[in-house]
Amino acid sequence: MSDLVPIKPRPTAAAISGGIVIPTAIAGAGEKAVRRFLEFFAATIRNRNTRDAYYRACCSFFAWLEGNEIRDLTDIEPLHVSLYIEALQATAAKPTVKQHLAAIRMLFDWLVVGQVLATNPAHAVRGPKHVVRRGKTPVLTSEEARILLDSIDITTLVGLRDRALIAVMTYAFARIGAVVAMRVEDYYPSGKRWWVRLHEKGGKRHEMPAHHKLEAYLDEYLAGAGIREDGRGPLFRSAVGKTGVLNARPMNRVDAYRMIRRRALEAGFQVKLGCHAFRATGITAYLEAGGTLENAQAMAAHESPRTTKLYDRTSDEITLDEVERIRI
């Protein structure tokens, strides 16, 4: 008997969750509930940003439950979900409230399918109505976008990088998440032109020809950085402090956002610009030049033309003209 090797206990979900906080109601429901909770975020949501947002939403709900002395998973009722959504509307925008409800509903569906719960308490709860016909993202005119691009000091490598990054968002209608994820090989020749490859949300790969100005900006940046042959390396790289030297690490979305804010201030813009403003600016400029909504939808990789229409500000001037007809 002394030769027997003891069998190591199977690691529990709570033990392997690392730094992830497990809500009290989930932890109290046992190992199966904990594992199912972790699987919901790890297995069902592939987009990291969505996963993080849904995790925060679910934890916020469970924290509210605990604050109201509801600590047992089986005690959660539709009324509790409804009261939470009602309370959330006092401090959060309607899209945020709808996202929280969607996250809670999906999590409980997952727990029901996994036989942790018998019913979904969020199933019958309805969120606030929210209809959007015009996006809130600031849009630059073609002249303003030109001013901002021309204001960047391209005698430095960081300047060449920043101009190229902004140009990809503007001329390729690209989301910042897809831009900072680009590798050098995602700017490639096809026939007589160069193309850009974007890895968009939902695992979609989107390819489109590069505008001639975008092609020039990317060529100058790649030549200055000396990274054209590093196909697997990140296209847009972080700088080492304020040295102006680029390292081998890719920029992230926060880096890009801070860069945009800095460049906008240097160009004299008072409006608070974010990365998404250049996607909207590119789409609007395209439509103003006679482009079609259908092609803009395809170029922006939108699932629905209604989403593309939110970026279209070509009707703003017409609306203002009509308002000025009121001669009082």
Image (cartoon, rainbow, N blue to C red):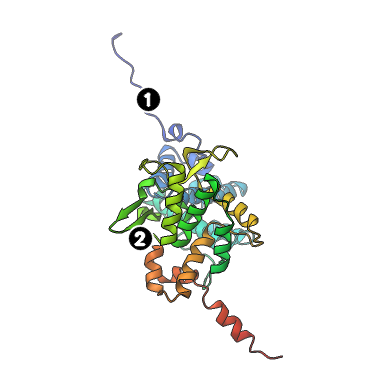
The residue depicted at 41 percent of the width and 74 percent of the height is: 291
Kindly indicate the quadrant of the structure image that contains residue 36: top left
Where does label 2 land, which residue?
A: 208
The vertical placement of 16 against 39, above or below, is above
Q: Quadrant of the C terminus?
A: bottom right
Query: Mark 1 highlights which residue?
Result: 9
The x, y position of residue 85, in whole percent, is 56, 59
> Looking at the image, which is closer to me, 250 or 29?
250
Instruction: Report the front residue among 29 and 147.
Output: 147
- Which quarter shows the N terminus? top left
Residue at the extreme top of the image, as rendered: 2
| Left or right of 122 on screen, residue 60 | right
Q: Position of residue 172 (x, y in %)?
A: 42, 60
* Residue name at image x 37 percent, y 72 percent: 294
Q: Secondary structure at mark 1?
A: loop
Tell me which residue sits at (44%, 69%) in the image. Answer: 308
**In the rendered image, the vertical position of residue 282 relative to residue 34, given as above or below:** below
Outermost residue toward the bottom?
327
Q: Is residue 126 visible?
A: no
Q: Nearer the viewer, residue 73 or 153?
A: 153
Residue shown at the point (40%, 68%) measured from the top left: 297
